[in-house]
Image: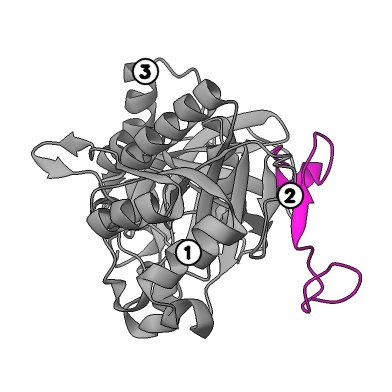
Amino acid sequence: MGRDGRRRDGGPVCQLRRPGAAARRGAVRVIVARRRGRLPGADGRPVIATCGNFDGVHLGHQAIMRRIRERADASGGLATVITFHPHPMRVLAPDRAPRLMLTEEQKLAELERLGVDAVVILPFDREIAAMPAEEFARRVLAEELGVREIHVGPDFRFGRGRVGDVGLLTRLGTELGFEAHAVPPVIDGGERVSASRIRRELAAGRVEEAARLLGRPFTLVGTIVHGEGRGHKQLLPTANLAPENEFVPERGVYVTRTRWNGQQWHGLTNVGIRPTFGGRRVTIETFLSGFAGDLYGRRVELAFLARLRPEHRFDTPQQLMEQIWRDIDAFEAWCREHGVAVEAPFRGDKPADS
């Protein structure tokens, strides 16, 4: 860190984001600290914390956030999330590191929505990775952050080799002056709600099940870029998304909702390689309902609501277009079933033999 209080990579070590700041990036109001040490803005208030990666901020994570919010309200403290960047597996076992469902911005926004006051993003480097569990509890939690209470999931692990568990954390807390508590997991269908479970659902294209476990639709953020223009040339206006998220659902055709600048449109999204045209690279191409403007260069949100079918290779473009009309029929049926009013998402006349 330099004398000006900035990280060596030029980024601030602490941000207090307010409305209007970085409005295009979805500014949040939580305190965001990107270094170890006392939490800026705590002003002597007790730090009521949790610790983990929290990718997805799913129903299980939300139960933990409610707990620290309740305890912070009761004690006049700060509901604080301690998390890491990069994901620890990127350092410990890069070949086994998960693709993350949320961008950092999305995660911060979800945590703010749940009432979190502060987020400490610890740099997960070799020093942290090599730190014994006892030292992490003493130096980071007790001395540097001044944690008063910490609430974690029952499978929480910490310290070198992940040897620390809730039992050890509780014993260390008694010695170091903080309380440690396990928050019961959220069980659904006899299985614990977890990020890995949700990734499995998304990898199978089961976006509705993933949404149920997340408590909201799985959503990508990214910029609309120019594609090959096949949609405009042949039938449908298209928006091609360059996602910032690492994780993308299984290839197929989905009902989606696109949001930009306070507006939203439902539509059909194809996630795939466009095998009919010999494609090899996965693209995310959305046919928007009732939209006639220009989104190129705009940063949008794309929420996945339902999967209509897997991706198929067709022998001719005409066969593909006939399938798209069937997809449109399925899309309109879904909209009617879910009370979504949309305009016809196509231009031109429907072929009589489709």
On whether residue 335 falls in the magenta region, the answer is no
Q: Residue at x 80, y 37 (%)?
A: 18
Residue 53 location (% of width, % of height)? 43, 58
Residue farthest front in this picture: 175
Q: Earlier in the sequence, mark 3 or mark 1?
A: 1
Extent of the magenta region? 1-29
Density class for disc 1 (Cα within 10 Å; few <14, some 14-19, many ≥20) is: some
Q: Residue at x 54, y 23 (%)?
A: 73
Q: Amino acid at mark 1?
A: Arg
Q: Residue at x 49, y 37 (%)?
A: 267
Q: Is residue 339 above or below residue 240?
A: above
Q: Which mark is residue 40?
A: 2
Q: Which mark is residue 138?
A: 1
Is residue 254 something that shows in the picture?
yes
- Gap between marks 3 and 1, in whole Å? 57 Å
Q: Amino acid at mark 2?
A: Pro
Q: Quadrant of residue 311?
A: bottom left
- Gap between marks 2 and 3, in whole Å? 50 Å
Report the front residue among 240 and 116: 116
Q: Which mark is residue 336?
A: 3
Report the front residue among 179 and 297: 179
The quarter in which the N terminus is drawn is: bottom right
- Gap between marks 2 and 1, in whole Å? 19 Å
Is residue 238 something that shows in the picture?
no
Q: Amino acid at mark 3?
A: Arg
Q: Earlier in the sequence, mark 2 or mark 1?
A: 2
Residue farthest right in this picture: 4
